[in-house]
Amino acid sequence: MGIRRIKKYIRILVWGIVVSWINNTRYKTEVTLYLLDILLSGLAYAFLGKSVAYQVGISQYGTENPIAFIVSGLIITHLVNTAYQRTSMSARGIYGIMKSPLPLWLGLVQNVVMGYLWSFFALIINIIILYSFGITFNINILSAIILLSLSLLIMFCLGVLSAGCNLIVKKGDPIRFLTTALTYYFSGRIFPVQVLPKPLQKMAWILPQTWIYYLWRRVLFSNVSLLQIRHDVMILFLMNIILAIISYLIFSYGINKIREEGLIL
Amino acid sequence: MIIKTVDLTKHYILRGDGGRRVIVANDHINIEVPKGEIYGIIGPNGAGKTTLINLISGLLKPTYGTAYILGYNIRKVGYKINEICLTSFSGEDNSFTGGFGRIPAVKALKYLAGMLGVEGNLERRAEDALKLVGLYEWKNYWPIQFSSGMLRRLELALLIMYDKPILCLDEPTIHLDPLHAKQFRDVLKFLAKRKGYTILLTTQYMDEVKYTCDKISFLKNGKIIFTGTPEEMRKRVPSQHIFEFITSSLDQTLEKDIEKISRVVRVESKSNNDKVKLRVEISDEISEEEKEKIFSEIISILSEKTKIYRVREREPDLNEAFIALAGEKYDGNKEN
């Protein structure tokens, strides 16, 4: 891939951000309510953290503060989940990209980039909430960069897998169920995994999201170096490779299926 | 040839409780479209027009055969042909929804084109495209307030900005009124004749075929049963002489009497309130004298028992040719 082509792709992605901004900000009330909603839910979680002292399992996430634990769950969700949400497209959405002059992979990446414009605002609001409750970060930058790359890739792969399933089953995507319902309970987003009964705890660590929330909190609050978390990062890396292969195969199969059968929804 | 299909075939498997059943949506389709031509794919509903467009756009995989688009084998490049040289569009598509409906048209075009990889001075290119589709004076207004016809032309402006030499349009003027449809067709003609675009389109509107298409293929049950110019298609109607009478009333014996006249091929009538429209088709191989004689005979039969309000003689139109090719009976209500 030449420099010229890379520049072109970057330009297309930047246009995506501009378009996302324009497309959403034209409805001013909606945008205001969206931002207000993030603020209110962030505050609600912060107050929840303040009122409920988690006795179990917080310390191993790198913080003793329940507010830090719970609001960071929101921050991590906004940080990594967009990569999943915006890739997990409907069959019609995928078909739209196929019809467009963009390569399919670029269309998917562009959709993610467009989504991050809005996650960015959510991220900022929640960081402000944390600061307003007197909580500060203690981040290891190198670990954060590596973890960001790995978690974005893993969520992107999950999104592609989900889109592939949408192409195959049309409705009722099991990956979406896995990444929303199961993540909510088992990933440690809102409460530590240690709160769960023992058998469920073991199951929870099968989910890549559980590793993502666990590692991110440690990187955000206790300045863990890459060396300290190398084993966990390796597990995440292996999950990434496995998911990348599975999602590629399922997505290709899905594309092939709609090209064979047509878009029967 | 810009587009060439070679025995292009598509089978679908029907789903439901009726057991496994294979339907042939396109059966060994062979068409050739040279540069700058507008090629129409027509046929009754379910004939396989959209399937053919989707096969050529690489969105569907052929069961057998292939298509070559600017020399690219569609079996190899698949839907990536949309990145290379072809733009596909359905009349139901609408890019100017949401926020894009609420910014000036020229900006909406600019941003959408940029997002889809169009390079260069986007604002100028957007303005040029708007000029081409006749919307330049509306460039600073919100698309959401445009009429359906204007929106469709705005879509076309976006397609023009992609700058791909081939347009595959699936019923591009669907739901448009005759005036807006004509404006859209004018732009298509301009693009083909002046800009060298090659356009493949499906349509149900015979006006569109007559006005726009250089050549057409008529699909029926997935097979091409006719290829030629619109005029050649019109001449496929069995009878090229049609008399139409508007009368006060008509009983069946009158119709039968007219049918008995030598060289009369078909007689049909349709009641509308207190009037009746009678349509008489006369055999092709007939001299002017014979025709006049038949006409006089019909008039004398009719004037005995009914009142004649209006008479006219005409050639069959493309709608009748369509119906003749599709193998259906003529229905006076379908006339334009």
Image (cartoon, coloured by chain):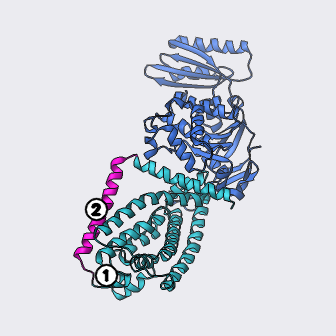
Chain colours: A cyan, B blue
Is residue B221 at least partly visible in the picture? no
Residue B87 coordinates in the image, percent (x, y) = 63, 46
Whether B128 is drawn above or below A9: the answer is: above
Give the structural element (helix, strand or loop) at label 2.
Answer: helix
Give the residue number, with chain letter if any, for mark 2. Answer: A40
Q: Which mark is residue B138?
A: none
Residue pictured at 68% horizontal, 62% vertical: A1
Q: Position of residue B185 (x, y in %)?
A: 60, 32
| Relative side of B60 to A179, left or right | right
Instruction: Name the foreground residue: B68 vs B50.
Output: B68
Q: Nearer the viewer, residue A161 or B51?
A: A161
A49 or A209, which lies in front?
A: A49
To the question of a shared chain for discs 1 and 2, the answer is yes
Residue holding disc 1:
A64
Residue B103 versus residue A66 in the image, above or below: above
Q: From the image, state whether disc 1 or disc 2 is nearer to you.
A: 1
Residue B106 image offset from top left, x and y in percent? 52, 38
Residue located 68% across and 12% down the image = B293
Marks 1 and 2 sit apart, C-alpha to C-alpha, by: 24 Å
Instruction: Give the mark nearer the N terminus: 1 vs 2.
Output: 2
Q: Looking at the image, which residue sits at the far left?
A: A51
Segment tinted magenta in the rendering: A26-54
Q: Is residue B4 magenta?
A: no
Residue reaching furthest to the bottom = A198
As for residue A37 lying within the magenta part, the answer is: yes
Alpha-carbon neighbours of circle 2 within 10 Å: few (<14), some, or many (≥20)? some
Would you say A40 lies left or right of A201 here? Answer: left
Q: Residue at position x 62%, y 59% from top?
A: A260
